[in-house]
Image (spheres, grey):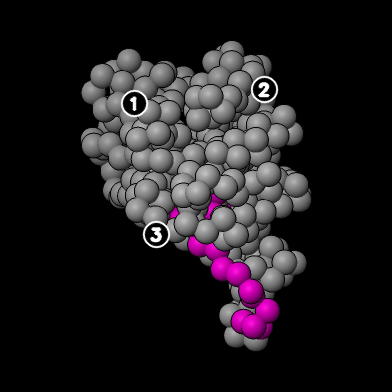
Amino acid sequence: MLFVSFRHSCVSFLLFYAPALLAQELHGAGATFPALLYQKWAMNYSLGKGVKVDYLAVGSGEGIKRIDAGEVDFGGSDMPLKLDELNQKGLLQFPMVMGAITPVINVPGVHIAQLKLEGQTLAEIFSGKIRRWDDPKLFVLNPDLHLPNKPIIVIYREDKSGTTFNFTNYLSKVSVEWQSSIGEGLIVKWPVGYAAKGNAGVSAKVKDTEGAIGYVDYADAMDKHLDYIVLKNQDGNFVRPNAGSTQSAAAGAKWEAENGFYRILTNAPGESSWPITATTFIIIRKEVKSIEHTHEILKYIDWNYRTGELSAMYMDFVMMPKSVMDKVRSSWREIKDSTGHSAWK
């Protein structure tokens, strides 16, 4: 993508030519699913507001760990925490954007949106029950494709990953056998395949491995020019991953601050809904040491809500509805210092 090289040149400018312009520094870490978007937003904010924002793509599990330990200003996770755990840890979470988790392939002779799969078949591939690309079950779904007599190489995330959580949550919903034998989580015991770190690592390994299949966010799939599948949804239609099918999956979602905005969008109904739609969340501490610094964090997030849609659309992420953003801003009043002063009015 063109913006990647542009981002690198701008970051170099900020690091080496204009450090004095950056009056504030904000630090975040976590999910790799939205990393390309978050880094684009950070560059724009640094250029426009003179505030340096770092976001380290280290995985959702590590993002939760670091904000819980107070090592970063905000954490990122594609797996929402339940209200009890948020209260126990003294954390506040809210949704930022939604996007498509995309199974990607490297199969000779098969290109973007040619291979059709359904949830059960996808589960059998990742569980090792279907081991070759010319398996009869794949031929039934793809009678017009010439699928090669080659082994399937499964690539999965080695780190604690919200992308893995949503992917395995989906497989657990569509396959009873998957749910009972493997289940869902930030990390699971994969029966077959090879590990890679982060969405970028999975993308690179799929690209370099003939016969591979993996799962990444749509932005990374496009960034690495990977071929992706079409997938049968709950309504029985084969759909592509993109902003429109993500928006369809999110159409019926109800977001409430009272339950910590806990919501999972996998296998959502809808004629054009993408079945593996995920939401990525920001997590911050509810009791803070500096009201002024925390206000800067919230100003940055608010700025992304207000101005970040164009960048999000470019990478086929979907912003939260305005009504949800308003609920999120209201929830920020819970963020206070030890004297009870709120970081957001």
Relative to 191, 112 lies left or right: right
Residue, x 60% and y 25% (percent of image)?
255
Q: Mark 2 points at which residue?
A: 251
Q: Distance between the residues labelled 1 and 2?
A: 29 Å
Task: Between residue 137 and residue 238, name the one nearer to us.
Answer: 238
Q: How crowded is mark 3: few (under 14 residues within 10 Å), some or many (20 or more)?
A: some
The answer to whether residue 172 shows anywhere in this view is yes
Q: Mark 3 points at which residue?
A: 71
Residue, x 49% and y 39% (percent of image)?
92
**Label 2 secondary element:** loop
Q: Which of marks 2 and 3 is in front?
A: 3
Relative to 83, 269 lies left or right: right
The answer to whether residue 245 shows anywhere in this view is no
Question: In the image, what residue type sits under mark 1?
Answer: Glu
Among numbered discs 3 and 1, the one appearing first in the sequence: 3
Q: How crowded is mark 2: few (under 14 residues within 10 Å), some or many (20 or more)?
A: some
Q: What stretch is highlighted in magenta?
A: 18-38
Quadrant assignment, res 53: bottom right
Q: Distance between the residues labelled 3 and 1?
A: 40 Å
Q: Distance between the residues labelled 2 and 3?
A: 35 Å
Task: Between residue 21 and residue 132, name the one nearer to us.
Answer: 21
Question: In the image, what residue type sits under mark 2?
Answer: Ala
Task: Give the x, y percent position of residue 105.
Answer: 47, 43
Quadrant assignment, res 50: bottom right
Q: Mark 1 points at which residue?
A: 124
Q: Which of marks 1 and 2 is in front?
A: 2
